[in-house]
Amino acid sequence: VLELGIIVHSVIIGIAMGASESPCTIKPLMAALSFHQFFEGMGLGGCIVQASFTST
């Protein structure tokens, strides 16, 4: 469920960035996306660590 939410969320943000025409709107979206994706990745990594997945 978490991964599905991340996928849908990323697609919506990608569409918003693709529809933006002005650099004034693209720069803040890119900054927000970078900040948000960092913490989203940290959250997903935390879930993977708690699930005790091992690499094979």
Image (cartoon, rainbow, N blue to C red):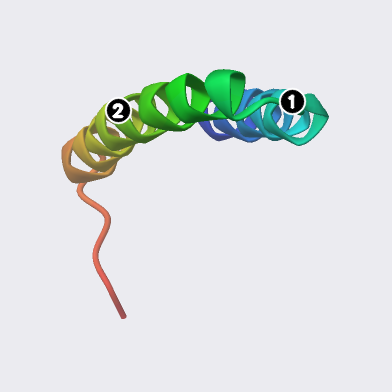
Mark 1: give few (<14), some (14-19) or many (20+) Cα within 10 Å. few
Name the kind of residue labelled 1 in the image.
Ser
Does 54 appear above or below 3? below
Is residue 6 toward the left or the right of residue 32 in the image? right
**Residue visible at 69% across and 35% down in the picture:** 14
Does 3 appear above or below 36? below
Q: Which quarter of the rendering shows the N terminus?
A: top right
Q: Which quarter of the rendering shows the C terminus?
A: bottom left
In 3D space, how far apart are the residues under numbered discs 1 and 2 (Cα atoms)?
A: 19 Å
| Secondary structure beneath label 1 | loop
How many dots with numbers? 2
Residue 21: x and y, percent? Answer: 76, 28
The residue singled out by tag 1 in the image is: 20
| Secondary structure beneath label 2 | helix
Check residue 35 in the rendering and tell me which mark sits there, or answer none: 2
- Which of 49 and 25 lies nearest the eye of the viewer? 25
**Residue visible at 55% across and 20% down in the picture:** 24
**Residue visible at 27% across and 73% down in the picture:** 55
The quadrant where residue 18 appears: top right
- Which of 23 and 37 lies nearest the eye of the viewer? 23
Residue 23: x and y, percent? Answer: 59, 30
The quadrant where residue 15 appears: top right
**Residue visible at 26% across and 28% down in the picture:** 39
